[in-house]
Amino acid sequence: MTQLKKRMVQLEVLRYDPEKDKEPRFQSYTVECNEEWVVLDALTAVKETIDPTLNFRWSCHMAVCGSCGMMVNGEPKLSCHAFLRSYEGVIRVEPLANFPIERDLVTVADDFIDKLKRVKPYLIPKEKKSIAEGEYKQTPAQLMKYRQFSMCINCMLCYAACPEYGLQPKFIGPAAITLAHRYNQDSRDGGRNERQEVIATNEGVWECSFVGACSEVCPKAVDPASALQQVKVASTIDWFKEHLLPGGAK
Amino acid sequence: MSRKPFVREVSKTGWYLKHPRYMRYMSREVTCIPIGAFALLLVCAVERLAQGQQAWDSFVAALTGPWSFLGMAVVLAFSTYNATNWFNVTPKAMPVQTGEEFLDGKYIVGAHYAVWAVATLVVLFFAGVL
Amino acid sequence: MEIVNTDVVIIGAGGAGLRAAIALAETDPKLSVALISKVYPMRSHTCAAEGGAAGVIKKDDSFDLHFDDTVGGGDWLSDQDCVEYFVHEAPKELTQLEHWGCPWNREADGSVAVRPFGGMKKQRTWFAADKSGFHILHTLFQTTLQFPSIQRFDEYFALDLLVDDGRCQGVTAMEMRSGMIKQFHAKSVIICGGGAGRMFPFSTNGAIKTGDGMALAYRAGVPLKDMEFVQYHPTGLPNTGSLLTEACRGEGGVLLNKNGRRYLQDYGMGPETPLGKPQLKTMELGPRDRVSQAYWHELQKGNTVTTPWGECVMLDMRHLGEKYIDERLPLVRELGIAYLGVDIAKEAIPIRPVVHYMMGGISTNTKAATQLPGLFAAGECACVSLNGANRLGSNSLVELLVFGKSAALSAIAHMQGLPKPNTAALQARANESQARVRELFSRTDGTESMSGLRKEMMDTMEKNAGLYREEIGLKEAVAKLAELRQRYNKIVLHDKSNVFNTDLFQVLELGSMLDCAEALAVSALARKESRGAHQRLDYVERDDQTFLRHSMAFYQGLNAPRLDYLDVVITKSPPGVRDYSGDHK
């Protein structure tokens, strides 16, 4: 049986204990890892064998729960999907950018949770239907229109990458607006106007200048940048219709 | 009780230096300066045109020369960079769905280049170059 | 200590907890609902379920067939009144989910599509690509956002139930980011805390699946039912244990040993079906317990493939074609490439059975009520029993919905005409709960390491309570777990911070797992038969005379649990033979 290759990995981790530290500081750990491990495995090994006081969120270890977002060498990554084989030398691990640090690698996610709620990310049906009447019909083509945007795992890597969000915290942000767009594009939904009031605003899409960093870091290829631009186009067309058509067609 | 969330400062002036992708973004955005300057030049041109033949001729004369040529070349380079960047991302803003598939982006981008080529030919024709 | 007064408190915000919350909000918007979870709801392990959710919709299908498949699949340990209720409710719940926006895969005409799944006679598994659990969870979570009556307490760790006057009236929970403990006083309490697969070293389960919900009820005197029945999912990645959905086999993937033989035909699931044309309820679409157990037998015979990650068998999906794989199994393809460097479109992928699901759990009836008035439970943490001795794939995602709703309706019914709570008594209970946690911080004579004890627990579970068990191993497990529970009281808490102290949470989680593990081992030792997922090398036959009953483990503090038995409810399907051969009638 071939042995799995081992590797000594040095991590530089940003620590912060609000009960002891005035500000965050780096701490270095050297731990033995398997070649095929991810950064999360290295952190777990540190916690189990070197420093039980290191704190970080994780759960599924298969890039679907969205818990383990953090900065790895300055890049927003899911630590369960950041393969050690992609890194040489010292690996710098910090909590997700643009969010306040609660403790060590754990950030305060409140702002994101609030914004998620604000955009009304739930189906507001165009027409009522009882359960007995069965499902709303939706063709595969209609499903494809929004499916990509429904894949968001709420990992917040896009917020960490977005420089607008970093400079202007009021920005509703990529994932939240993308989720609103997901419902806008759903053939069963009739709530677009309600959502536009929230997202087609200065704090919404118009804060976005299409840097595109969000789509570059998204681990699920949701392409939030695309969703936001589509919302801008739809919003612009709305504006013209409202101002140029008699009666302000909506 | 003992919480004290720490907010990391984001530099308002130097944030784009932190990552190559932000530098790429800024390089796209900075093209607005030469393009904006050229737009102002065109406004001047219209103004001179309105002032009569002599004003127009001296305007054109002022624009003849190596520095002017260099300036135009720079503007052309920046606006080409700007245009090609925006062409390439247009499929993101306006996806075309055909049945269950989405039209490959290259067709949408290609259409933009095609229109650009045609417009260029038209302008060159009216300028008497073609 | 701060008191949060609410009508209903729900512990756990995965599929079952969210469904219960919505049912409460829709039935009576004036009810206040406190939804507590130790993680943000989208992190709940429901998100990792892949394959789909079963509900009868096709014309050639029937409730009776779904009933028969489930009861047979459960090796006749399922309570048949519960299964009857479940199969009728299933399509309604799945349609309701669709009304809330769930992106189910569709047929060309726009109706919901179904796919074949293990142990099912007909195609009835609704699915959303290979991310069904993810979409169900997010649809439910996003739907809850429209109800102002649902107040969420995200990242709150539930500690102890508050019981007074023979009724469950609340729970204490710690706000994880501040260390502050709050008491929730409620008229009804619903536990939806999930399973406890992390007792084993190798599972598909995320870090959070540590049986805290089960332990909460168990310590309050509610029995844990059928804990010995642990499902091994036949196809997990050999290094991380990550789940490769049963749909791989449903869509036509085949299992091969080192000789390239589709070995399942040697274990009562033959004859071999044509490649790419799976036949329902046979060969690779046999039930999970049989398919996992076949691996074990191949291992004994030396027919497994040796890999750097251990002994495996091969799952071959190449014949499905790249396009079909990208349409139906995109997540699986991505997992294989990312974590194992294997592209399922181009090569067969090594896999092995991994712990996946607990059939057992908090004992409830079909109305999701436990024997403690005011306490209800739903989802994987509960044992109704729907799944009996072995769960069929795609029954559990629906189970969350059906019994999540059931629990909500029962919780409302319980609230009528309740006497006023004795707040002083509840506060006294809450103070005891707080003292228990604070003692960990002030302990000076600790000697044991949390990760050390956890490893010892996992080792004995893997060795002695795995796919195949026998008396000597189970006795060793029972003794070992009793010893670990004693040593647990001497654990050293290294991190003394109040702010998001994961050392503390892991210590508490270990306590839950040790309680669940001991209940499991004791129940397994006493069940001297082989049934479904519980296989004994020393008692290889099913014994309906003695064991057509549920094991009920009752908490006895630091002593081993007391065991009792509850008869299985048989209505229209007397115990028969589980026949997964292709030529069955």
Image: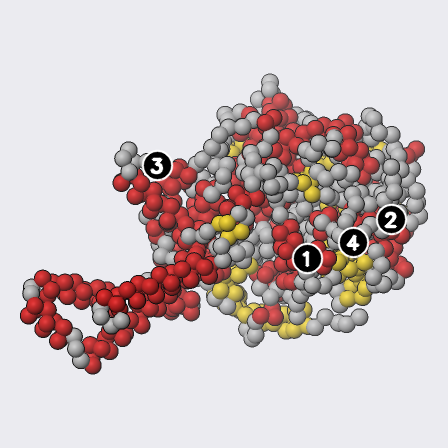
Residue C312 falls left or right of residue A175: right
Mark 2 and mark 1: span between their CA atoms?
25 Å
Relative image position of residue C107 (x, y in whole percent): 62, 41
Give a yes or no on whether discs 4 and 3 share a subunit.
no
Q: Amino acid at mark 3?
A: Lys
Q: Residues within 10 Å of mark 3 (few under 14, many from 20)?
A: few
Relative image position of residue A25 (x, y in whole percent): 47, 65
Which residue has dot 4 on it?
C275
Mark 4 and mark 1: span between their CA atoms?
13 Å
Question: Label 2's element?
Answer: loop
Question: Label 4's element?
Answer: loop
Foreground mark, 4 or 3, reads 4
Mark 3 and mark 2: span between their CA atoms?
62 Å
Visible residue check, residue C517: yes
**Observer-nearest of A238 and C202:** A238
**Observer-nearest of C518 and C198:** C198
Mark 3 and mark 1: span between their CA atoms?
46 Å
Which residue has dot 1 on it?
C321
**Observer-nearest of C377 and A36:** A36
Q: Looking at the image, which residue is at 78% across and 43% down?
A: C280
Q: Residues within 10 Å of mark 2 (few under 14, many from 20)?
A: some
Quadrant housing the C terminus of chain C: top right
Q: Chain of mark 3?
A: A
Q: Looking at the image, which residue is at 34% across and 42% down?
A: A238
Question: Label 1's element?
Answer: loop
Foreground mark, 3 or 1, reads 1
Which residue has dot 2 on it?
C270
Query: Which mark, by number, is residue A250?
Result: 3
Mark 4 and mark 3: span between their CA atoms?
54 Å
